[in-house]
């Protein structure tokens, strides 16, 4: 461990984390546009897929750098875990957008708008946190704040999902309306799952702060 302090460390991981989190924020914003907009949905879904591929490439770069680096600025499991959790957050959101497009529901509900807003806020906190990670000891309290906000927002998403599902089938008497309700139920669950993946990023940030700050 003493020797490690004097060896050059590869700091490019922080750039990859910043790029991955910025990409996640762009995905969340685009997902909200897909749900709330009525124009160019096909094009936006294709772009969402492109952003998901970009996220995969960033994750690949992190693991390639890990394989090529002797001394890392954080423990390898923290670097690999954070990269994977950001990637899974992006993957989950991309899947939601694709499913919404496949179902052709054509309108956004108040609950879907709320859940996509939560995703944008979570991604915003993750994005802000990655800009501080390179100096974790100095920025520990601010990083912890961002992690706690991600958790708080996930709890808000849980409450929103429960409230929505409680009344989703009220007044549904016709088969087409029932099909729509079933599809929305699935999408709401997927949106809430995406907030869980954001919480995984928050958990990792908290663990990093506890270890290095």
Image: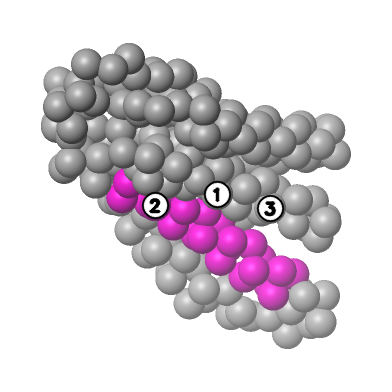
Give SS at disc 3.
helix
Looking at the image, tell me whether mark 2 or mark 3 is earlier in sequence order.
3
Looking at the image, tell me whether mark 1 or mark 2 is earlier in sequence order.
1
x, y percentage for residue 88? 55, 49
Q: What is the number of the mark on residue 200?
A: 2
Give SS at disc 2.
helix
Q: Nearer the viewer, residue 58 or 52?
A: 58
The residue depicted at 61 percent of the width and 79 percent of the height is 169
Above or below 67: residue 137:
above
Q: CA distance from mark 1 to mark 2?
A: 9 Å
The answer to whether residue 141 is left or right of residue 16 is left
Question: Magenta span covers which residues?
Answer: 180-204
Q: Which residue is mark 1?
A: 88
Q: What is the number of the mark on residue 30?
A: none
CA neighbours of label 2 inside 10 A, class few (<14), some (14 to 19), many (20+): many
Q: Are marks 1 and 2 in contact (CB under 8 Å)?
A: yes
CA neighbours of label 3 inside 10 A, class few (<14), some (14 to 19), many (20+): many
Give SS at disc 1.
helix
Q: Which residue is mark 3?
A: 95
Q: Nearer the viewer, residue 20 or 45?
A: 20
The residue depicted at 51 percent of the width and 60 percent of the height is 193
User: Is residue 84 part of the magenta span, yes or no?
Assistant: no
The residue depicted at 52 percent of the width and 28 percent of the height is 68
x, y percentage for residue 191? 55, 56
Q: CA distance from mark 2 to mark 3?
A: 18 Å
Quadrant (top left, top right, bottom left, bottom right) of the N terminus: top left
The answer to whether one can see residue 96 in this image is yes
Q: Are marks 2 and 3 in contact (CB under 8 Å)?
A: no
Q: Nearer the viewer, residue 141 or 169?
A: 141
Quadrant (top left, top right, bottom left, bottom right) of the C terminus: top left
The answer to whether residue 151 is left or right of residue 16 is left
The answer to whether one can see residue 36 in this image is no
């Amino acid at each position: 461990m003493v020797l490690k302090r004097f060896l050059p460390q590869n700091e490019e991981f922080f750039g990859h984390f910043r790029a991955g989190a910025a990409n996640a924020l762009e995905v969340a914003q685009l997902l909200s546009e897909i749900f709330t907009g009525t124009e160019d949905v096909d094009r936006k879904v294709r772009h969402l897929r492109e952003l998901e591929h970009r996220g995969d490439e960033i994750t690949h770069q992190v693991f390639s750098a890990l394989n090529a680096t002797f001394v890392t600025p954080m423990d390898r499991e923290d670097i690999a875990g954070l990269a994977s959790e950001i990637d899974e957050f992006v993957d989950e959101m991309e899947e939601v957008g694709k499913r919404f497009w496949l179902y052709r529901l054509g309108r956004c509900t108040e609950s879907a708008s709320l859940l996509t807003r939560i995703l944008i806020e979570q991604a915003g906190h993750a994005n802000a946190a990655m800009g501080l990670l390179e100096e974790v000891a100095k920025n520990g309290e601010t990083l912890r704040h961002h992690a706690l906000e991600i958790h708080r927002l996930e709890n808000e998403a849980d409450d929103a999902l429960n409230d929505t599902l409680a009344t989703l089938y009220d007044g549904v008497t016709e088969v087409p309306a029932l099909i729509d309700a079933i599809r929305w139920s699935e999408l709401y669950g997927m949106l809430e799952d995406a907030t869980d993946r954001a919480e995984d990023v928050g958990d990792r940030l908290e663990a990093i702060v506890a270890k290095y700050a």
